């Protein structure tokens, strides 16, 4: 990806961090827009679409977690959290919402640039994978459920569309691409997050629990996503690929 064309939206209410960081990123070849609040960021997003959003969590008014939900679910924009919260639980929340990465303040700007490049590469690969499915477009069908990878639309057996976050979509895709295979937490985290998030493997357990609540008849007695004690998780279902028109 040509970095000179990469547009970043930097959302942080702290001018002492935002302005010098913006200057540094511009010197690295990125085009940077600044927003001091979630409200200002939403106004910018109405006019244009950046390639990636750098987002502070703690801001007056709407916080970064709320804005992140909008970014990953409605806009499907790559997002990196800039957070002063160093506790594992706070990092897990960000990953569960669907953020692609996080950097704990204070951070080394060069590390942030490396993470930006990594997230953009993953996003580019995901887009290329999606393009490969487009001819012909296919839907993944399992136990009456249907997932359209291009539209990221999950349809229940009764025809109802079930909303899923970007993180839930990536997790479900990992299972659908490896049906009846045991996937341990490290492998799932690598497939879903693409970084050293294995240090916080409870994030996978929490994401699996949330996904189960959406696709299982009884999430406390799961039949589709089964726990393999000492091993990880397994999708216990046959997965078929159908053209979009055939899948309804």
Image (cartoon, rainbow, N blue to C red):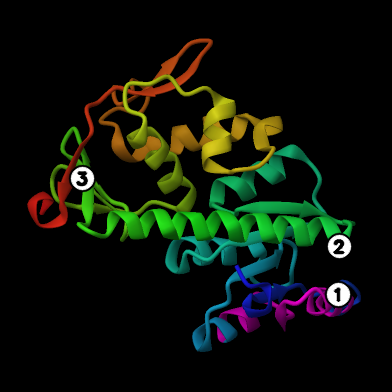
* Disc 3, SS: loop
Residue at image position (43%, 19%) is: 182
| Circles 2 and 1 in contact, beta carbons < 8 Å | yes
* Disc 1, SS: helix
Q: Which mark is residue 156?
A: 3
Q: Which residue is mark 1?
A: 24
Mark 1 surroundings within 10 Å by alpha-carbon count, few (fewer than 14), some (14 through 19), many (20 or more): some
**Quarter containing the N terminus:** bottom right
Query: In the shown orientation, is residue 193 left or right of residue 8?
Result: left
Q: Which mark is residue 109?
A: 2
**Nearest to N terminus: mark 3 or mark 2:** 2
Is any atom of residue 7 visible in this view?
A: yes
For residue 156, which quarter of the picture? top left
Q: Is residue 39 magenta?
A: yes
Relative height, residue 150 to residue 53 (above, below): above
Residue at image position (43%, 18%) is: 227
Region in magenta: 20-43
Nearest to the eye among marks 3 and 2: give it. Answer: 2
Q: Which of the two residues, 138 or 201, is positioned nearer the viewer here?
A: 138
**Nearest to N terminus: mark 3 or mark 1:** 1
Which x, y percent locates residue 142? Answer: 21, 35
């Amino acid at each position: 990806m040509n970095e000179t064309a990469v547009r970043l939206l930097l959302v942080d209410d702290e001018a002492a961090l935002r302005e010098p960081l913006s200057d540094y990123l511009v010197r690295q070849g990125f085009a940077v827009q600044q927003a001091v609040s979630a409200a200002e960021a939403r106004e910018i997003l109405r006019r244009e679409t950046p390639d990636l959003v750098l987002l502070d969590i703690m801001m007056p008014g709407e916080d970064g977690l709320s804005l992140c939900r909008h970014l990953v679910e409605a806009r499907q924009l790559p997002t990196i959290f800039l957070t002063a919260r160093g506790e594992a639980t706070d990092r897990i929340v960000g990953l569960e919402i669907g953020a692609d990465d996080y950097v704990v303040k204070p951070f080394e700007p060069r590390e942030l640039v490396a993470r930006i490049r990594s997230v953009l590469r993953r996003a580019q690969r995901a887009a290329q994978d999606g393009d490969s499915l487009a001819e012909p477009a296919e839907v993944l069908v399992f136990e009456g459920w249907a997932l359209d990878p291009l539209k990221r639309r999950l349809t229940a057996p009764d025809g109802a569309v079930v909303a899923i976050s970007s993180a839930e979509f990536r997790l479900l895709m990992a299972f659908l691409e490896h049906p009846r295979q045991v996937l341990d937490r490290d492998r799932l985290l690598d497939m879903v997050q693409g970084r050293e998030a294995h240090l916080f493997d409870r994030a996978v357990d929490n994401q699996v629990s949330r996904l189960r609540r959406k696709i299982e008849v009884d999430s406390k007695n799961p039949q589709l996503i089964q726990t393999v004690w000492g091993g990880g998780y397994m999708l216990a279902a046959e997965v078929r690929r159908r053209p979009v028109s055939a899948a309804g």
